[in-house]
Each structure stands twice: as C-alpha cells, then as structure tokens.
Image (cartoon, rainbow, N blue to C red):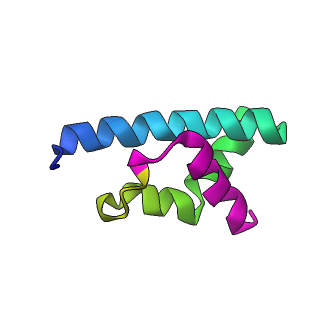
C-alpha cells in the first residue's frame, strides 16, 4: 500500500506525540526533557525514514525501540 507524503507526515506526527506522552508518563520526565529524548534519538530518525515503516507500529513498540537505545 502506498501512502501520500501528507499521510506519512500525519502518521509520524501522531506517533511522535504518543511517544513523547509515553516517555513523560513512564520515565517521569518533563515535556522539554521528553521532547529532547525523542527528537535526539535514533528511533526518531528511523521513524522519519518511510522505508522503515516504523510509523505503522504501535506506540508501545516504538517506545520499546527507544528504550533499547539506552538513552
């Protein structure tokens, strides 16, 4: 299935929002700290790469990927 650039951006933005919320909740970080952790991660770089199809996964799975980085 092919998605448009707009659909891809929408999915990435939604996943990023969910991921930041999970980081804040599970790690008791402030919003700026959670933003920093997510946006400076390899997981986020993979999320931006449409070939990875990481945006199709659940937020919990993507959060596990982020945790596996050891940030």
Q: Residue at x 44, y 33 (%)?
A: 14
Q: Quadrant of residue 7?
A: top left
Tell me if residue 29 can be seen.
no
Taking the image as shown, residue 8 lies to the left or right of residue 34, namely left
Q: Residue at x 56, y 34 (%)?
A: 18
| Vertical position of residue 65 compared to residue 9: above or below | below
Report x, y in % for residue 52. Answer: 37, 63
Task: In the displayed orientation, state which residue is furthest to the front.
Answer: 1
Report x, y in % for residue 15. Answer: 48, 39
Report x, y in % for residue 20. Answer: 62, 38
Task: In the displayed orientation, state which residue is furthest to the right.
Answer: 28
Report x, y in % for residue 36. Answer: 65, 49
Q: Quadrant of residue 34?
A: top right
Question: Which is the main secondary structure of the residues drawn in magenta?
Answer: helix
| Count of marks overlaid on the render | 0
Q: Is residue 63 magenta?
A: yes
Q: Is residue 54 magenta?
A: no
Tell me if residue 1 can be seen.
yes
Query: Where are the magenta residues, as a range?
Result: 55-71
- Is 41 in front, or is 67? 67
Q: Residue at x 79, y 38 (%)?
A: 26
């Amino acid at each position: 299935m092919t998605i448009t650039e707009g659909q891809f951006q929408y999915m990435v933005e939604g996943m990023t929002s969910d991921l930041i919320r999970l980081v804040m909740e599970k790690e008791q970080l402030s919003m700026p700290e959670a933003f920093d952790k997510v946006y400076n991660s390899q997981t986020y770089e993979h999320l931006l790469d449409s070939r990875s199809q990481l945006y199709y996964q659940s937020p919990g799975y993507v959060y596990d990927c982020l945790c596996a980085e050891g940030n």
